[in-house]
């Protein structure tokens, strides 16, 4: 039976490694070991050449510049140990930076589904549990880091759910991440995805033409015209009041309403006042259903006028 060949870079069976995920380098070397055994590769020089064959060009250049790679007296295990040391995988499998990176990425993307929550929980649990065992992280810090991925609306509902599920839990003690995970699953099932929310439509724009700003009534009066008519009628009313309160030369007081309240002439009343008739003809005033003289908009003149 023929000995299987080593896979080529990019093939499905080829091992992979990315410097962005340094904690995977042990898995990378474990995959290489299985392939070396299957392909019966035993020499250090060939093994070292395959170490740099399954990574990108930039990573390969940095690895091949190491003395453990270039020096023929250095073994494959020497190169492996050196790379594990450079990627902080000798004494510590994870460091706090790994946890911060995981939380930061999920915080930036957000948690929108149960699948995303489950993926995060599994990775967070693996890293944080290791850091706690290594005395690099406390239980309280673990809880605080876990809660950072939720926005304010979800976090508020999450805290209420935790209080309902654990009524005897002391408020000064942190919740376990498994308890938070279960409460978060319940909350996310009641959150409506943004794509399913009704669209907010803007009110129709109001046309800025002069015709659209004016009511269709032919009796519409501009503000400037109304102000001018008020001023003119105020003068007429003032003159009428002045005439009605003037004492006659005979000495006695003039009888009430003895003169026209429109122009002040004592020879007629407002019903027969030519000046008022001119105002009505020009549209400056009108008579209402009761026969009272009023402004075009229906306002009464601020004094009862006998009709």
Image: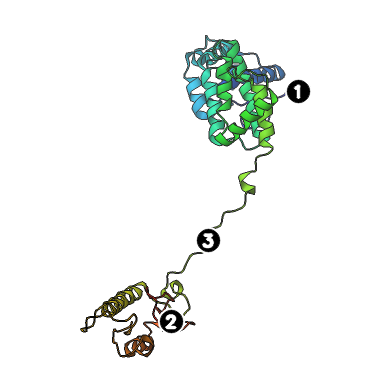
**Front-most of 56 and 241?**
241
Q: Assign the N terminus to one quadrant of the image.
A: top right
Q: Measured from the top left, where is residue 225 in percent x and y?
A: 34, 76
Please give the residue where the numbered disc 2 appears in the rendered image. Answer: 292
In the image, residue 139 above or below residue 7: above
Crowding at mark 2 (Cα within 10 Å: few <14, some 14-19, many 20+):
some
Q: Is residue 51 visible?
A: no
| Residue with the mark numbered 1 | 2
Left or right: 5 in relation to 48: right
- Which label's residue is closer to the chain start, 3 or 1? 1
Q: CA distance from mark 3 to mark 1?
A: 76 Å
Q: Secondary structure at mark 1?
A: loop
Residue shown at the point (47%, 75%) measured from the top left: 215
Task: For marks 2 and 1, give the one nearer the viewer.
Answer: 2
Q: Quadrant of the C terminus?
A: bottom left
Q: Position of residue 260 (x, y in %)?
A: 33, 85
Distance from disc 2 to disc 1, alpha carbons, whole Å, reads 119 Å
Q: Is residue 128 visible?
A: yes
Mark-to-mark CA distance, 2 and 3:
43 Å
Instruction: Classify residue 285 as left or right of residue 155.
Output: left
The answer to whether mark 2 and mark 3 are in CB contact below 8 A is no
Q: 98 and 57: which one is in front?
A: 98
| For residue 287, above or below residue 107 | below
Q: Is residue 305 above or below residue 196?
A: below
Mark closest to the chain's N terminus, 2 or 3: 3
Q: State the residue position of label 3.
A: 203
The one nearer the camera, 24 or 217, is 217
């Amino acid at each position: 039976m023929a000995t299987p060949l080593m896979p080529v870079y990019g093939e499905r069976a080829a091992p992979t490694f990315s410097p962005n995920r340094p904690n995977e380098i042990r898995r990378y070397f474990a995959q290489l070991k299985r392939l070396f055994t299957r392909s019966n590769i035993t020499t250090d020089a060939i093994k070292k050449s395959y170490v740099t064959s399954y990574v990108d060009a930039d990573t390969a250049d940095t690895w091949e510049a190491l003395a453990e790679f270039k020096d023929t007296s250095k073994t494959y295990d020497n190169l492996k140990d050196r790379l594990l040391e450079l990627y902080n995988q000798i004494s510590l499998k994870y460091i706090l930076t790994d946890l911060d990176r995981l939380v930061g990425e999920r915080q930036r993307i957000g948690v929108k589904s149960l699948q995303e929550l489950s993926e995060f929980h599994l990775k967070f649990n693996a890293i944080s549990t290791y850091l706690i065992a290594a005395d690099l992280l406390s239980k309280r810090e673990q809880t605080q880091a876990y809660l950072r991925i939720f926005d304010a609306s979800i976090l508020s509902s999450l805290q209420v759910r935790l209080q309902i599920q654990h009524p005897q839990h002391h408020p000064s003690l942190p919740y376990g991440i498994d308890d938070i995970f279960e409460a978060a699953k319940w909350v996310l099932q009641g959150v409506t995805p943004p794509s399913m929310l009704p669209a907010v439509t803007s009110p129709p724009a109001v046309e800025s033409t002069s015709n659209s700003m004016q009511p269709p009534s032919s009796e519409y009066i501009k503000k400037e015209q109304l102000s001018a008519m008020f001023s003119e009628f105020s003068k007429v009313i003032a003159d009428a009041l002045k005439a009605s309160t003037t004492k006659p030369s005979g000495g006695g007081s003039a009888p009430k309403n003895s003169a026209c309240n429109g122009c002040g002439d004592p020879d007629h009343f407002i019903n027969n006042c030519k000046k008022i008739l001119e105002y009505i003809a020009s549209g400056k005033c009108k008579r209402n259903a009761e026969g009272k003289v009023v402004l075009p908009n229906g306002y009464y003149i601020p004094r009862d006028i006998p009709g």
